[in-house]
Image (cartoon, grey):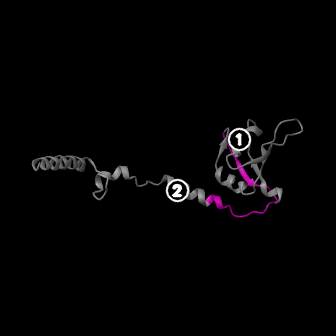
Amino acid sequence: MDDKERVLYCGNLSERVTEDILYELFLQAGPLESVKIPKEKDGRQRNYGFITFKHAVSVPYSIALMDGLSLFGKSLHLNARSGSEAAPNPYKEQLRQYEISINEPSYHQSDNWKHDYYSRRPDSRSSTFFSSHVQRESSHFEQYQ
């Protein structure tokens, strides 16, 4: 496995972002080996960093997962490291479909029990009917004893 395939470029970093912050953030996408933010000659950090994952599959996943994320008011620019093979990201479409599904109104049975006459769960009308029916049967049964 080529090391380049496991490295993620993270650009447009705020000067307030630390390697520890990036480590905690990208750990959500997969196990990490290292996080490095290069420094200028004067000791200030540059506005980009490199995240090395243990598994190559974590790179496209983190790109899809963290797409549009901002840290300290700056939107992150995420890409696979230069020189690695550019393949379509299989996770972007899956995450897009998931986001669509959680934003669509869904069918909740609890909201529709009153209107579902074929349901086995009694609503207020059938529970009244059921309890009165049981009482009538027991009174009727007592008549025969």
How many residues crowd mark 1 within 10 Å: few (<14), some (14–19), many (20+)?
A: few
Residue under numbered circle 2 = 100
Disc 2 element: helix
Answer with the quarter of the image where residue 117 lies: bottom left
Tell whether position 74 is magenta: yes
Q: Residue at image x 64%, y 51%?
A: 65
Q: Position of residue 127 (x, y in %)?
A: 24, 48
Q: Residue at image x 49%, y 52%?
A: 103
Q: Position of residue 122 (x, y in %)?
A: 28, 50
Q: Write down the region rendered in magenta.
A: 73-92
- 24 over 7 or under it: above or below: above
Task: Indicate which disc, 2 or 1, sits on the residue closer to the N terminus.
Answer: 1
Disc 1 element: helix
How many residues crowd mark 2 within 10 Å: few (<14), some (14–19), many (20+)?
A: few
Q: Which one is nearer the viewer's eye here, 93 or 41?
A: 93
Please, what is the three-letter code of the amino acid marked with disc 1? Glu
Compared across the picture, whether 53 is left or right of 68 comes to right
- 89 over 18 or under it: above or below: below
Answer with the quarter of the image where residue 3 lies: bottom right
Q: In which quarter of the image is the N terminus?
A: bottom right
Q: Residue at image x 76%, y 47%?
A: 32
Residue under numbered circle 1 = 24
